[in-house]
Every structure is written in structure tokens, then in C-alpha cells.
């Protein structure tokens, strides 16, 4: 539980705090909020429930904020970057430790291209961006019939 609370503090509460603190300035300048999220905020990914909980919560909080800002006619955009596997050092370190992890690195998107996609999304005031493309496909698995969703989440995509 201590780990879970720490993880929530770093990956959810700090996002909310930063956005709240920056909001007055953002309202003055027609600013952008860009949330670094994951397809794990759209579908369950086994063995990472702590991570999913944070990502779903980010999506919930910032989607509400976007709607509220729009309704209040405030010129602040909220972009949620729904990312797949990115070839960061952290990802590489994790994948080195799991069986077959080295092979999975082939699906990791380059860090610089991901950053470009995220910045482009923020600058064009997109509601969401999906990067790399399979992040969009994964994010829509829950729209499938239940048996297919179960198979994909419990077997095909499980680590
Ligand atoms: C909103 O802010 C952007 C700057 O990010 C500006 O270019 C745009 O003109 C603003 N729109 C309105 C309606 O004020």
C-alpha cells in the first residue's frame, strides 16, 4: 500500500497540483496542458493495476478539466498523450528484466519522435494524441465483444 500511495502521489496528485498552480497563468495566455498518459489509461493491462489506476484517473481528471474550461469559454487546451511503449532508459531497464523483454524493445517508439508527436499535439490543441499508432488500436479493445476483449487482455497482450 505504501508503494501504491507513493505512486499515486507522484503520478496523479502531482499532475493535479501542477495544473492547478499553473491554471491562472494559462488562462491569461491561452496556454496548453499536455498530459503524458498511456493506453493503460484506456484498457486494463495485467499485473500493472497501480499504473492503470493512475492513468485512468488522469484521463478522468483532465477530461473533466477540458470540458469545464470549454464550458467556461477559457482558452486553455488539454491534450492527453496516449502513448504506447517508448524506448526510454526506464523502459529498457524494465524490459531487460522480463523474459522476452529484449524482443519487445523492437516495438518501442524512439524518444525524439514521440516527443515531436506530443509537442505537435499540444501546439495544435488536439484533445488526444495516440503514439505510436498501435496505441490507438489497443485503446479501443474495450469496444470489442467481451470474449474478444477478454482474450486480448488476458492472453494475447499479457506479459
Ligand atoms: C487562444 O490562445 C492561442 C495561443 O495559445 C491564440 O493563438 C488564440 O488566438 C487564442 N484564441 C482566442 C479565442 O483567444
Image (cartoon, grey):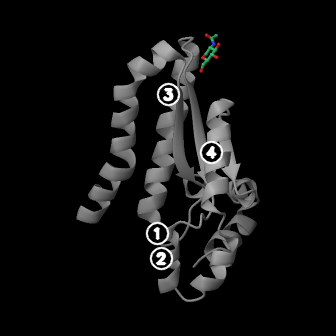
Answer whether residue 70 is visible to the viewer in this image. yes
What residue is shown with label 4?
118
Give the alpha-carbon distance from disc 1 to disc 2, as whole Å. Answer: 6 Å
Q: Which of pointers 1 and 3 indicates the residue nearer the eye?
A: 1
Q: Quadrant of the C terminus?
A: bottom right
**Dot 1, how many residues are within 10 Å of its Cα: few (below 14), some (14-19), or many (20+)?**
few
Question: Which percent across, then down, holds residue 15?
Answer: 39, 41
Give the alpha-carbon distance from disc 2 to disc 4, as whole Å. Answer: 23 Å
User: Circle 4 sits in a helix, a strand or a loop, which is it?
Assistant: helix
Q: Is residue 72 above or below residue 12?
A: above
What residue is shown with label 2?
94
User: Circle 2 sits in a helix, a strand or a loop, which is it?
Assistant: helix
**Camera-nearest residue between 115 and 83:** 115
Q: Which of pointers 3 and 4 indicates the residue nearer the eye?
A: 4
**Camera-nearest residue between 138 and 130:** 130
Question: Which percent across, then down, holds residue 5?
Answer: 28, 56
- Disc on the earlier residue, 1 or 4: 1
Answer whether residue 1 is visible to the viewer in this image. no
User: Circle 1 sits in a helix, a strand or a loop, which is it?
Assistant: helix
Ligand 1 within 8 A of label 2's CB?
Answer: no
Q: Quadrant of the N terminus?
A: bottom left
Q: Are marks 1 and 2 in contact (CB under 8 Å)?
A: yes
- Disc on the earlier residue, 3 or 2: 3
What residue is shown with label 3?
65
Give the alpha-carbon distance from disc 1 to disc 3, as whole Å. Answer: 29 Å
User: Circle 3 sits in a helix, a strand or a loop, which is it?
Assistant: helix
In the displayed orientation, state which residue is furthest to the front.
112
Q: Is residue 18 above or below residue 26?
A: below
Q: Are marks 1 and 3 in contact (CB under 8 Å)?
A: no
What residue is shown with label 1?
90
Amino acid at each position: 500500500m505504501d508503494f501504491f500511495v507513493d505512486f499515486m502521489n507522484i503520478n496523479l496528485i502531482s499532475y493535479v497540483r501542477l495544473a492547478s498552480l499553473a491554471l491562472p497563468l494559462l488562462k491569461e495566455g491561452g496556454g496548453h496542458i499536455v498530459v503524458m498518459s498511456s493506453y493503460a489509461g484506456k484498457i486494463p493491462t495485467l499485473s500493472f493495476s497501480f499504473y492503470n489506476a493512475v492513468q485512468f484517473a488522469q484521463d478522468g481528471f483532465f477530461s473533466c478539466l477540458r470540458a469545464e474550461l470549454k464550458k467556461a469559454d477559457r482558452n486553455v487546451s488539454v491534450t492527453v498523450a496516449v502513448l504506447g511503449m517508448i524506448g526510454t532508459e526506464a523502459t529498457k531497464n524494465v524490459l531487460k528484466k522480463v523474459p522476452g523483454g529484449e524482443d519487445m524493445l523492437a516495438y518501442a517508439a524512439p524518444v525524439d519522435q514521440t516527443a515531436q508527436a506530443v509537442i505537435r499535439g499540444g501546439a495544435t490543441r488536439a484533445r488526444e494524441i495516440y503514439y505510436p499508432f498501435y496505441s490507438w488500436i489497443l485503446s479501443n479493445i474495450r469496444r470489442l465483444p467481451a470474449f474478444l476483449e477478454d482474450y486480448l487482455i488476458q492472453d494475447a497482450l499479457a506479459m
